Structures are given as C-alpha cells and as structure tokens.
Amino acid sequence: MGRFAWTTMLGFWRDRLFLGLLALSVALSLAPVVGMLSMRQVTELTMTLCLSLSSLLLLLLAVFGGTTVLWRDFERRYAQSVLTLPVRRWQVLLGKFLGVALFLAGVALALALVSAGCILFATSIYPPDRPVVWGLFVAAMVFDTLKYILLAAIGVLFSSVSTNLFLPIFGTVILYLVGTATQDVYEYLSGPLAETVTPAVGHIVRFLYYFLPNLKAFDLKLNAIYGLAFTPFEGVMVMGYFIGYISVVLGLALVAFNRREFL
C-alpha cells in the first residue's frame, strides 16, 4: 500500500501540478499589497486573502486528484496490469487515496508557510490592534486540509463506480456545494422561520443534513481572522466526524471497487 501511495504522490508532481502551486504562491505573495488598501484592517484582509486562495487551490487539487486517481489507471489500462500482481484490491485503492491525501497535505504545508510569511510581512508594516492568534491560523489550515482530504475521498468513491470522468467530477463538485450549505439550511429550519416550510420538507432537509457531508464544520477562517474562540472539544468533535465520515466513504469505495469488473 505504501508503494502505491508513493507512486501516486510522485505522479501528481510529474503532472506539473507543482507549477500551479508556484503560481498561487506568487499570488499569495501579493496579498499584503492588496491588504494595504484597507488601512484599518491590513492584517485581517491579508489573512482572508491567504486563507481563501489556499482553500481554492486545495479545492481544485482535491477534485482533480480524487476523481482522476483511479480513472487515469483505467483509461491507460494500468489497473488491469496492477491487479494481476500479488496485491489485494483494497491495498491498491487505499494506497491511491493515501497518495492523494499526502499530496494535499504537502501542498497545504507549503501554502501555510507562504501565508504565514505574508501575514508576518503585513503585521510588520501595519501592526494590528488585535494580535494574530497563530494557533487559530494553524487550526484553520489543518481543518481546511482535512475537509479537502474528505472531498478527495468522495471523489475516489465516485471513481470506483464510474467508467467515465464526468460523473466523479460533477458528483464531487455538487456534494461540495451542498456540503457547504447544509449547516446554514439546517439552522434556518431550526429557527423561528421553521414554520414557513412543510413538515415533509423539514424531514427531508434534516435527513440530508445528517446524510451528506457537513463541510462547513471544517471552516475556521473567521476564527483565525478575528481571533474567535475555538475550544479543544470542538476540535475533537470535528476530528471524530472526519474519521467517521471518511471511514464510511472509503468503506463504500472498497465495496464498489471489489465488485467492479475489469475487462
């Protein structure tokens, strides 16, 4: 499994995705310049730009990596050759996913270092009224990375059941959009305006809230930007949710991959 993870991770670097990382790093280096346009909130705007650009790149890499990691092997007929070796299918699938996860983690680490340099540069020019809470910044980057690793696992699940690339990409993007909105919709229906919808709609929304991924739980950008408290208990709860949900997703992917026919 480790061999598949290593070769998968190297494959992404050879696909010149690293050039995209360098391009975004250059964009991140300009964040303090843009942040200076806000004379009162230079640090906050700089951190917002850095976290948002990092999140955008991780989103693109998660969708691309998770949905193509199996499809490329099927398209190039590599999967049929690999499965003739004395390896189990679960080793291939988990190895491929682990390679994607390690690649995302490596990119996130590089982006975090570049972002930290931009924020330090901004604070040195315009000292903020509120000190930067670096622990919250690190937590925001870590949980953002976990969110996109989970999204990559969803892409792997779609790739394990689909014979084309359209369904995995489309399905992963749709689940990302829905997963970022489920929390807001649930809170809306749980508030005073719950009477504006029928009970049937309310039950359907609540079912989807618990069934679909709640990606907003991983979003700590506001906590990092404005120094809002984030307790260790909340962190443990989100980590538990991540472990449980990704275990179910990968379990379903393994079942589908084991039953798939290779011609």
Image: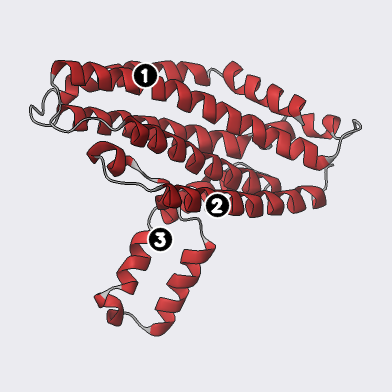
Q: Residues within 10 Å of mark 2 (few under 14, many from 20)?
A: few
Q: Residues within 10 Å of mark 3 (few under 14, many from 20)?
A: many
Residue at the disc numbered 2: 240
Quadrant into which the N terminus falls: top right
Could you tell whether 35 is left or right of 143 in the image? left
In the rendering, at what x and y percent does residue 152 appear? 56, 41
In the rendering, at what x and y percent does residue 103 appear? 57, 27
Residue at the spot x=35%, y=65% of the render? Answer: 185
Given the image, on which type of amino acid does mark 2 rest? Answer: Gly
In the rendering, at what x and y percent does residue 133 appear? 29, 33
Pair 1/3: label in front: 1
- Above or below, 217 against 195 in this view is above
Quadrant into which the C terminus falls: top right
Marks 2/3: CA distance? Answer: 19 Å
Residue at the spot x=7%, y=27% of the render? Answer: 39
Where disc 3 sits, the SS reads helix
Residue at the disc numbered 3: 182
Q: Point out which mark residue 114 bears.
A: 1
Residue 20 found in image quarter: top left
Pair 1/2: label in front: 2
Marks 1/3: CA distance? Answer: 32 Å
Residue at the spot x=25%, y=76% of the render? Answer: 193
**Earlier sequence position, callout 1 versus callout 3:** 1
Q: Residues within 10 Å of mark 1 (few under 14, many from 20)?
A: some
